[in-house]
Image (spheres, rainbow, N blue to C red):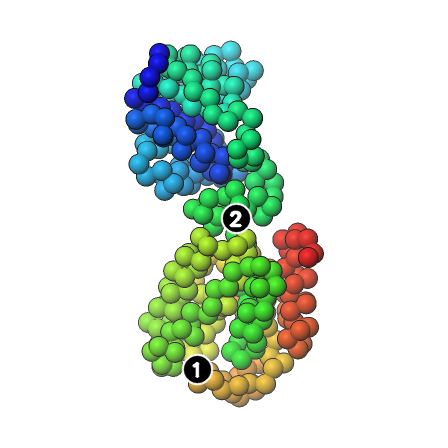
Amino acid sequence: MSGRPASGLVLGKFMPPHAGHLFLCDFARAACDRLTILVCSLPGDAMPGERRAAWMRELYPDCRVVWCNEIVPQEPAECPDFWPIWREVVARHVGRVDAVFASEDYGHRLAAELGARFIPCDPLRETVPVSATTIRADPFAAWSFIPRAVRPWFVKRVCVFGPESSGKTTLARALAPALGATLLPEYGRTWTENFGVGIDARALREIADGHVAARNAALRVANRILIEDTDPILTCVWSDMLLGEREAWMGEVLDPADLYLLTDIDFDWVDDGTRYFPDPERRRLFHERCRQELVGRDLPFVEISGRPAERLQTTLKAVKARFNLADG
């Protein structure tokens, strides 16, 4: 068999998809007329197969991406019928193919079983020296090899959480560059600066929805860690303080951060035009409600107090310990 294949196959777990997979798929797409990418998964995999298939569809919208979640042997030594089983799997999910593209030796035998041509690609992985195992073990160290579409899965989120005028924004703005992280500003401030401080239940929902939309966008460009200046869980506490009640959606699971930094009220209250509670008792109540919210939801948090420099050092130590980050 010679000439350009009409149809090609790339098969893998893509757990997760990485730059090496992209090199293989780009090679295969350029070397055949129609490429099918078969994403294989098993129950109990470290990443859901459906999610991996969705990533590959996003990365390769011009290719046919098929998800196979059948429970089948993974190595020839596991089953004497390994190759007939896989021949049937490909036949059911993909159909006839003219070429199998792979960087591993199994490509020779699989192609023979399918009556197809084997076309190897970078078998020594010299062009893109990475593996999915390496990424799963230490995604931050292999960050440059993780496609943008996949990075949100690995980003760690730190939320600066607390009552108004407690130094949240000051801390968030200092923390992000200190960690080389990405900052997500408070959406509630964006809302009030545009529409005023008259807050009702509808406004709180718009603020929460705006934060989620901004977060989802930021996760795709975040550099390993995303620093969130408040989140929708804090919006729930704002509802308590401003309205004395909560809407039903506030009882839902609100996708909490990986670590919360609860800021103390050891700063003087400052009226910046978007604040509500100058009374010391109300400030103390707000702070206690914030703590109760984190405790009630069983969320990991560290209490942060002191002057800005002290707060930053305490926070850096907490974040590095939480995510096993090296100093420097």
Q: For residue 3, what is the image quadrant?
A: top left
Q: Residue at x 41, y 61 (%)?
A: 214
Q: Quadrant of the C terminus?
A: bottom right
Which numbered dot is residue 206? none
Residue 315: percent from left, percent from top? 64, 65
Q: CA distance from mark 2 to mark 1?
A: 34 Å
Number of residue marks: 2
Q: Residue at x 56, y 34 (%)?
A: 129
Q: Between residues 291 and 143, which one lies in front from this camera angle?
A: 143
Q: Residue extending furthest bottom?
A: 279
The answer to whether 220 is drawn above or below residue 115 in the figure is below
Looking at the rendered structure, the kind of residue marked 1 is Thr
Of callouts 2 and 1, the N-terminal one: 2
Q: Quadrant of the N terminus?
A: top left
Secondary structure of the residue carrying tag 2 is loop
Residue 123: percent from left, percent from top? 53, 24
Which numbered dot is residue 154? 2
Residue 245: percent from left, percent from top? 41, 74
Q: Is residue 190 visible?
A: yes
Looking at the rendered structure, the kind of residue marked 2 is Phe
**Label 1 packing within 10 angstroms: few (<14), some (14-19), many (20+):** some
Q: Between residues 205 and 323, which one lies in front from this camera angle?
A: 323
**Label 2 packing within 10 angstroms: few (<14), some (14-19), many (20+):** some
Q: Between residues 21 and 268, which one lies in front from this camera angle?
A: 21
Q: For residue 52, what is the image quadrant?
A: top left
Reading the image, the residue beneath label 1 is 274
Q: For residue 201, what is the image quadrant?
A: bottom left
Q: Residue at x 55, y 85 (%)?
A: 269
Q: From the viewer's perspective, is 323 left or right of 189?
A: right
Secondary structure of the residue carrying tag 1 is loop
Q: Is residue 298 visible?
A: no
